[in-house]
Structures are given as structure tokens and as C-alpha cells.
Amino acid sequence: MSELNFTPAVGDLPFTPQQRHLLALAHELGKTTFAPRAPQWDETASFPFANYVDLKDAGLLKLCVPASHGGLGADYPTYMMLAAEVGRFCGATALTWNMHICSTMWTGVLADGIEMTPEQRAEHMSRRELHFSRIVNDGAIYAQPFSEGTAAAAGRAPFGTAARKEERNGVSGWLINGKKIWASLSGAANYYGILCTEDVDGKTPDARDTLYISVPATSEGLSISGDWNPLGMRGTVSRNLTFKDVWVSDAEQLMPRGIYFKGAQTWPAMFFTLAPTYLGVANAAYDFTVSYLRGEVPGEPPVKRRQYPTKQIAVAQMRIQLENMKSIFWRAISEAKPNPSKDEKMRLYAAHYSVMEGANDIARLALRTCGGQSMMKHLPLERLYRDSRCGALMLPWTAELVMDRMGRETLYEAGERDE
């Protein structure tokens, strides 16, 4: 296969033929359709439905569904590369696509690396057939509501949303009650992959009892509420979901009992999947700055501003930071695996922090360097600046929580405590 005629957001790497093909596809979609549409999703805070039609038609909704189930069978690094490329053209599309893809990746390649009993493995293989077939055959979109406004989404407390075992008409299932906030794709998804705590009589809620259950959007007792008018990433439409006596059958479980908690301990890289969106945003801010200073922005006067030393220095600073972000990002995704070493986990944290904070640093420099005209809303830079600030706030790994984890896990080995 021929080489790519562009440099991907992750950099110039030794891609496989499949990766080159998919990156070219994502780049073309992003450049020709996602980027031109991005302003409208931002202005109206509306979900990018048209982009999801394109993702479906391109086969990218089933990107991480195993080939044995009719998907493209992409692995973790491949998804992370594509997400960065999509984020380069529309941050809201990349961020919401992540929620959908994780529903397939967590139950697919990541679950394959989690230790299960033979009974659990058989249960999981049977149930994921249902979920994968919905995506492959029907083009279903899955969301992944996480946050509740408590410490649960950060992994420091059990989820307040609870699921209680209940049989109805001879069918075993779960009765779900609770609320999720910042629920991306609310009103757009066909199924919501809910993280909740099993409600057991006489037992104190415990994070080890976390359940991962799919709730159909048409379920009785499921409601969506609240406004969505944030700083950036406005097209995610992350409103509130409320579950009031929502009943689903056992078949809706995305993982067997207890496996999500084990997966979170086994696969820390599962929480790194928000980062590529912001690596893409950083690339977009850099790309715009170079084009603007060269007088090559479509629709703008062909005025060159590249001759000023201060602007040359700023572009150099942006490129240095971007190359550092790409390098550590690539190292982290290439090392992603079950049960990483301590050094690998530290690099993963460092990569996440570097990308999430670095994206805003680059967008800030871009805005300052391009000057007042770049603040105008008919140009993408002010949107990229707003979008870039949101990454450091994303649970479960906000910038603050990552710093806390790195410091604690560096100074304390597992099980160590001060007297």
C-alpha cells in the first residue's frame, strides 16, 4: 500500500496496512465533512447526527468489534490513532465516538485480557454477541454514562446508581435506579452502558460490586433532563439521565458480575481513551497557526505574517510541545496491556496529563500568536481553544487526579501506609 499523503495527528509512524487505510479514511472524512460541519454543532450545542451517519457508512461504528463478530477488529493502538485524527477535525465527534467505541473495546479486546472463570467467560461471550450484532447489523450507537457528581467516577467510591436483582414474568433481570450527569450522547444513543452498584440486602455498597449494564433508550422509567450550555465540546450534548425503576434483562449485561472492577485494576489504559481527542485538537490548533501565518487560510486575505521573529519562535515552541506530546502518546498506546509495570503505568499517567494540559497550552499559544482576528467565530481557533480546555476536567482522570495518582503511586508501593 502506498504511503499516506499527510502526516497523521499521532505523527509519522510505522503503520500497518490496516492502520494506513483507516487513517486515510478518517482524514478524508474529517477534512471534507466533519470540519465544515463542526461550527454548527458548537454554535447550537447539538449532537453531530450527520457525522454518525458517515461513521456508520464508513464502517467505523464497528471499528473495534472483533472480526469474528463482523467488525473491523481494530486493536487498542489503532483506535487511539484514528480518534486523534477525527479529533483534529471535530472534537465533539471524536469525544462522543470514544464513548461508543469503548463499549465495544471494553467488552472486546480488553475483556479478552481480563481473567475470568470458564463460566464467566462463556456468559460474556454469549452476551456480547447480542451487543455486537446490534452495532454491526443495525448501526446501533452505545453511550457510556459515567459521572454522578460524586467520587465514584474517580474510582474512589461505589456508584450511587444501583441495580437490584429482580425477576419479571419468569425472566431474570435488574431493576435500576439512580442518576448520571454529564452523560454524553444523551438523547442520541440507542443504548446506555451504565456503571452501577449491585444492591444486595444487608451489604454495604462496594466498588467491587460494580455492574456494567446496557439500558435501551426506549426503556420505561429512563428520562433525560437539564440544559447543555458549556464552554466547549458543546456537540457532546451531555445532559442528565435519570433511571426510575428501569428494568432490563440479564442479557443486557455488558460484563459479568465483578468483572468491570477487575478490568479497571487490570487495564488502566482503558481510561486513556479520552486523550486522543485532545491530541487531535492540539494538531488542529498548530495546523491553523501555520496556515494563518503563511496567509493560506481559505476565505481569508492572503496576508503573510510569518516574517516576524516572535511568531517564528512561537511556532517553534508549539511544534516542540506537540512533538513531545506525540512521542509520549505513542509510547503509551504501544505499551497498553493488561497488568502493566509500574514504569509503564507512570508513563501512561504522564502521557495523559501531557496531552490534556498540552492541548490547551498549544491552543493558547496559537491564539496569542495569530492575534485578534483569530478570535472571530468564523475561524476555528476560538472553538479549538475552548474545546482544548475541557480535557483536563474529564473524569475519571482529570489533570488533578492524575497528578495525585502519580505522586502517591511513586512514593508508596502497593499496600504501604504511614503509621
Image: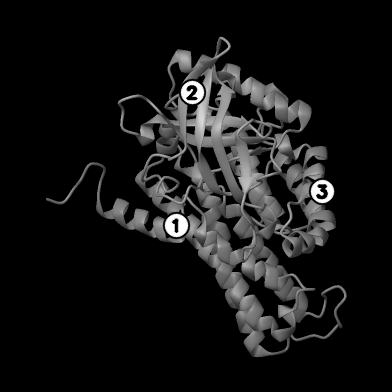
- For image coordinates 69% across by 23% down, the residue present is 69
Task: Quote the CA–CA distance across marks 3 and 2.
Answer: 34 Å
> Residue 350, which numbered label?
1
Q: Give, as a three-letter code, the residue at label 1.
A: Ala
Seen in the picture, residue 58 relative to 323 is either above or below; the reply is above
Q: Nearer the viewer, residue 25 or 193?
A: 193
Q: Position of residue 229 (x, y in %)?
A: 64, 62
Whichever of callouts 3 and 1 sits on the residue coming sooner in the sequence is 3
Q: Secondary structure at mark 3?
A: helix
Q: Nearer the viewer, mark 2 or mark 1?
A: 2
Q: Position of residue 159 (x, y in %)?
A: 43, 40
Q: Position of residue 247 (x, y in %)?
A: 57, 25
Q: Are marks 3 and 1 in contact (CB under 8 Å)?
A: no
Could you tell whether 185 is left or right of 157 in the image? Answer: right
Q: Which residue is mark 3?
A: 50
- For image coordinates 49% across by 55% down, the residue present is 352
Q: Secondary structure at mark 1?
A: helix
Q: Give, as a three-letter code, the residue at label 2.
A: Pro
